[in-house]
Image (cartoon, rainbow, N blue to C red):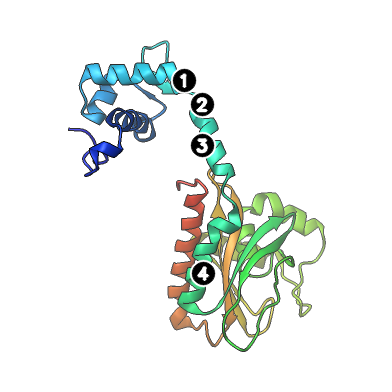
Amino acid sequence: MGTDKQRRIVDPKNHIASVVKAIEVLECFKRGGPERSLTQVVDQTGYTRTTVYRLLGTLELAGWVERTDRGSYRLTLQVFELATTVLAGFDLRTVASHVMSELATAFDEHVYLLVPDGTRAVCIDLIESSQPIRVMVLTVGRSLPMYLGGAPVALLAEMEKMLLPRLLKEGPMTTPAGNEIPETELRQTLAETRDRGYAISSGDVTQGVVALGACIKDRRGQPVAAMSIGGLSTDISHERLDTIASALMDGADAVSRKLGYVGD
């Protein structure tokens, strides 16, 4: 009986079985909802009713669960406070660094990490390609308006309702080459970005350079950053684009989940 975790082969001298059982009881709330009855916990863990009753009583005494008026059990804010402490220990750059390194190794293109700053997106980390031709406009500390580039557009697509009105009030949206981007064109680009799951920037920042961007979300589902892969259009060809885009979205999703995002 019990869960898969309980059935793992462990050294009995180096673990306390009752602690493992208590953790399994707590994990019932993760899978089953904010409140669980004694019977529901018994069914999920496979332990006897007496064992579960004692475990819940001990967790209640320790302040991790509490009884409701209906006689069921629910987690207390003490659990939330512990989770908040863990999440606060995650630094975005640290969390993203491993994924960025994997992308840079896999494709040998520039990999960027940007965060929103008003109506601009600021580069906070960068891994350079080993290729001799430098295509970078962005370096750490520099920024782009939200309507230009792979990562900024990926962010804007998720924050359109809040940020696009501000961008429109700031004046014409122009590329470095001086070309104005019409509002209707930008709105269509943002809609396509949301449908695809990633943004494509082709020559709008630098002629001959392509960048893809995918959004990173926090535990509340809010966009907090975006990762981008950029390089010469001859290197990020149509044949490679789908492969790079898929890896980039997987990478952004992996970072999001490390930040606590659980998906739609």
Residue 61 position in % (x across, y down): 42, 16
**Label 2 – label 3 distance at C-alpha:** 9 Å
Circle 2 residues within 10 Å: few <14, some 14–19, many ≥20: few
Residue type for callout 4: Ser
Q: Which residue is mark 3?
A: 83
The reply to whether the C-beta atoms of the residues labelled 2 and 1 are less than 8 Å apart is: yes
Residue 8 position in % (x across, y down): 23, 43
Residue 263 position in % (x across, y down): 45, 48
Q: Is residue 142 above or below residue 18?
A: below
Residue type for callout 2: Gln
Residue type for callout 3: Ala
Dot placed on the residue nearer the N-terminal end, 3 or 1 = 1
The reply to whether the C-beta atoms of the residues labelled 3 and 1 are less than 8 Å apart is: no
On the rendered structure, is 191 left or right of 73? right
Q: Is residue 179 above or below residue 66?
A: below
The quadrant where residue 169 appears: bottom right
Q: Residue 101 — which label?
A: 4
On the rendered structure, is 22 left or right of 91? left
Q: Which residue is mark 2?
A: 78
Q: Secondary structure at mark 1?
A: loop
Q: Can residue 179 be seen from the camera position used here? A: yes
Q: Is residue 129 above or below residue 157?
A: below
Q: Residue at x 52, y 25 (%)?
A: 77
Residue type for callout 1: Gly
**Label 2 – label 4 distance at C-alpha:** 36 Å
Q: Which residue is mark 1?
A: 63
- Please state which of residues 263 and 104 is positioned toward the viewer in this rendering: 104
Q: Quadrant of the N terminus?
A: top left
Dot placed on the residue nearer the N-terminal end, 2 or 1 = 1
Dot placed on the residue nearer the N-terminal end, 2 or 4 = 2
On the rendered structure, is 27 left or right of 199? left
Q: Is residue 199 above or below residue 52?
A: below
